[in-house]
Image (tube, rainbow, N blue to C red):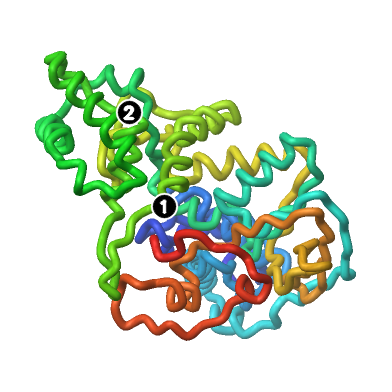
Amino acid sequence: MKSGKYQVKAKGHGSESMPMEVDIDGDKVTSIKVDSSGETKGVADEVFRRLPKTIVENQTLNVDAVSGATISSHGVIDGVAEAIDEAGGDSTEWKNREKPAATKVEDEEITVDVAVVGAGGAGLAAAVRSIQHGERVAVLEKYPQIGGNTSRAGGPMNAAEPEWQSKFKALPGEKQTLEDLANTPIEQIDLEYRFDFERLQRQIKEYIDSGTDYLFDSTLLHEIQTYLGGKRTDLKGNEIHGKYALVHELVTNALNSVKWLQDLGVKFDNSQVTEPVGGLWRRGHKPVEPLGYAFIHVLGDWIREHGVDPYLETRVEKLIIEDGKVRGVIATRADGSTLTVHAKAVILTAGGFGANTKMVQKYNTYWPNIADDSTIVQQLIHLQLLAMGLT
C-alpha cells in the first residue's frame, strides 16, 4: 500500500459524515484518529476507544462491533476500509483476516455488601448512595460502557422549584391551565388525591388573586399534573392512575435529586426553565452538558474515584437465592468466564420495563394486541411489584 495519511469520512450514528484520519505505512495501518464530535457523548465512546486500538494492534478489519453502538462501529470499520482501498490495498482481504482471539481470564468470586445490576442512571445512582453509606459495592453492566437509556435521555429533570421558577414570566396559556384546575370539581378527583388537590386549588387562587405574572409552580401542582396526566381507562374498562404513594414520593424528592446531583458535580443551566418533551409544565432543570451524558459521566467518575470500577460486558444470568433471600448474582463475562458476586443485597436496575417484551405482555392492560402469557424471574422469587400497568 502507498504510505501516507488518508482523510476519509464514514457514517456515524449521530452524524452522516464522521471525519477520520488513517495513517498507513507500507502494508500496515499505524494510526486511526476519529473526529467523533458529531456523535452523541456517552453512547458510542467505547467504539472510538476500542476499535482503532484493536485494528492497529491486530492488523485486521475482522473485528466485533461494540454492543449497543453497531452503527458507529461499522462506521469506523468502513472508514478504515476506504483508506486501505485508496492506498491500493484490498479492504475485503482485511475483513477476511483472522479475528483477534479473546483472552479468557479465570473465573472470579467476590464478596461485597451491595451488588448493583445495571450501570445506567438508576444503577449508578444506587451505587453512589450505597458507597456514601459506607457499603462495599460491585456494579455489573452487560454492555461495554456505562450509561444505559440515561445516556440517550433528553437531559432536563422535572422538579418544582418555585423560588427559581418565579424569576421567569408566565407564558400565554399557563394561567388558563391553572384556572381550569382551580375550577375542576373535586368529584372528578380520585379520593386519595382530593386533600392535596384542594390545597393546590387554594394555592392557585392565591396566585391568581395576587395579579402577578411570574411562572407559578409547586410540588402539589407537579403531583396533580402527574396524576391527571397518567389517568386513563385500560382495555378492561378499568380507570387507572398513578399510585398516590409513588407519585407523592416522586414529586417531593425530585428537587432533592437535582440538588444531590449538583453536589456530585452535575452543572445545570439556571438561565432558562424548560418544559421537557412529554412534560406538562415548565419545570425542567437542564444540564449544561448535552443529554443524559451530563449525569452519566459525573456518576461514573464519582464511583471510580471511590474505588468502584464497573464490571463491563458482564451479563447477570442467575440470582443466588439463600433461604428465600437474594444473596448475590452469577454473571458471564465477554470472554466466557464466570463472575460470582456474593452480597448482602442486590439492586436490580437492569433495563427499562418497556424493553422487556415478556413483562409488557404480562402487565400491560392498556395497549391492544398484547398477550398475557409470560412467566418471569421476578415471579419465581415472589417479588412484590407495584404499579406495573403504569408505563
Residue 218 picture location, percent across and down: 32, 28
The residue at the point 66 percent across, 76 percent down is 380
The amino acid marked with disc number 1 is Lys
Q: Residues within 10 Å of mark 2 (few under 14, many from 20)?
A: some
**Residue at x-position 26% and y-position 71%:** 237
Q: Residue at x 60, y 62 (%)?
A: 350
| Label annotation for residue 243 | 1
Image quarter of residue 250: top left
Instruction: From this view, report whether residue 294 is shown above or below residue 169.
Output: below
Q: Is residue 274 left or right of residue 17?
A: left
Q: Is residue 137 left or right of residue 274?
A: right
Can residue 31 be seen in the rendering of this structure?
A: no
Q: Secondary structure at mark 2?
A: loop
Q: Earlier in the sequence, mark 1 or mark 2?
A: 2
Q: Which residue is mark 2?
A: 218
Q: Name above or below for residue 335 compared with residue 4.
A: below
Look at the picture and state if 391 lies above or below 211: below
- Residue 320, quarter of the rendered image: bottom right
Point out residue 246 in the picture as x, y percentages from the top left corner.
46, 48
Query: How far from the left and from the top, in percent, is residue 9?
Result: 42, 61
- Structural distance between the alpha carbons of marks 1 and 2: 20 Å
Q: Which mark is residue 220?
A: none
Task: Point out the frontmost of discs 1 and 2.
Answer: 1
How crowded is the residue under tag 1: few (<14 C-alpha within 10 Å), some, or many (20+)? some
Looking at the picture, which amino acid does disc 2 mark? Ser
Total numbered labels placed on residues in the image: 2
Left or right of 148, for residue 346: right
Residue occupying image coordinates x 10% and y 31%: 172
For label 1, the SS is: loop
| Dots 1, 2 in contact, CB < 8 A | no
